Image (cartoon, rainbow, N blue to C red):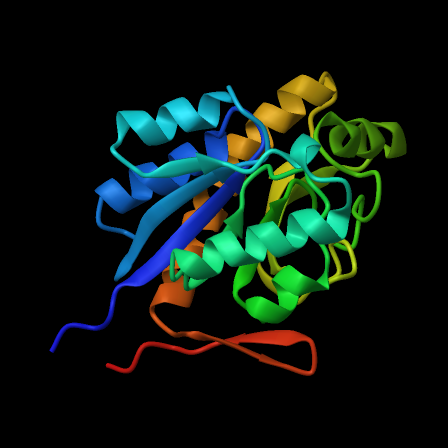
């Protein structure tokens, strides 16, 4: 008997390059029994919505500006995801703050990709190009990306996967950002989603354990 389909919601706030990586992986059959059944944007007219439309994926906009508090927005978000019977929530460049109402509704079922090797260059204020600017200012020789489970503390949830990427002498923040996307983010995020959909991720004492597939 086939396993139950894992319904995935991808939350976006911009261009949706990580969303595209997930869509591509899905179309190659690499998400196991997972299927993206909803793309939710925190503002209208972002290109990620066009990506969803091109691939026939349902989408909706839950505009942060229409809610007067984080709590009100978080409740609406949790209710929207719940009504869509979502099993896994993936933050793919979702830059809107949410509170415990979402985390409590989806415990250990929210994934995020961060463009650095956590615990370096992470936490409040570290997003987008700021991460890569900080890495270059520090003069690190390697950076990379991390996929982790989302918890109320920013970028502090259990780590699922990490991949290092070399930093080059002539890198700019934009060049480093692109390399980390191509070499790490676009590979790690689909892999983490696949592991979740295969039921291979467990969390104990704030650490992720990945089950091996039995021969």
Pick whichever, 191 or 14, lies toward us.
14
Pick whichever, 175 or 99, lies toward us.
99
Name the quadrant of the C terminus: bottom left
- Looking at the image, residue 48 lies above or below residue 141: above
Check the image and name the residue furthest to the right: 138
Left or right: 90 as drawn, with respect to 180:
left
Residue 11, percent across and down? 52, 43
Left or right: 130 as drawn, with respect to 104:
right
At 49% across and 30% down in the image, what residue appears? 16
At 75% across and 60% down in the image, what residue appears? 156
Residue 10 can be seen, yes or no: yes
Pick whichever, 40 or 112, lies toward us.
40
Residue 162 can be seen, yes or no: no
Location of residue 103 by image quarter: bottom right
Residue 44, percent across and down? 53, 24
At 70% across and 50% down in the image, what residue appears? 72
- Looking at the image, residue 4 lies above or below residue 83: below
At 57% across and 24% down in the image, what residue appears? 178
Left or right: 146 as drawn, with respect to 60:
right
């Amino acid at each position: 008997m086939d396993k139950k389909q894992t319904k995935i919601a991808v939350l976006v706030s911009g261009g949706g390059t990580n969303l595209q990586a997930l869509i591509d992986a899905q179309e190659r059959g690499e998400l196991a029994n997972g299927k993206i059944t909803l793309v939710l944007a925190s503002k209208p007219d972002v290109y990620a919505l066009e990506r969803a439309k091109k691939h026939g994926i349902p989408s909706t906009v839950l505009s942060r500006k229409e809610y007067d508090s984080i709590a009100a927005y978080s409740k609406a978000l949790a209710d929207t995801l719940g009504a869509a019977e979502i099993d896994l929530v993936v933050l793919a460049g979702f830059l809107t703050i949410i509170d415990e109402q979402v985390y409590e509704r989806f415990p250990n079922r929210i994934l995020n990709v961060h463009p650095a090797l956590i615990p370096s260059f992470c936490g409040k204020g570290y997003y987008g190009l700021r991460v890569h600017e900080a890495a270059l200012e520090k003069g690190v020789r390697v950076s990379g990306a991390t996929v982790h489970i989302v918890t109320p503390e920013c970028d502090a949830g259990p780590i699922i996967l990490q991949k290092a990427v070399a930093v080059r002498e002539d890198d700019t923040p934009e060049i480093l950002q692109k390399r980390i996307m191509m070499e790490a983010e676009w590979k790690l995020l689909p892999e983490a989603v696949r592991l979740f959909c295969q039921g291979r991720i467990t969390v104990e004492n704030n650490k992720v354990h990945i089950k091996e597939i039995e021969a």
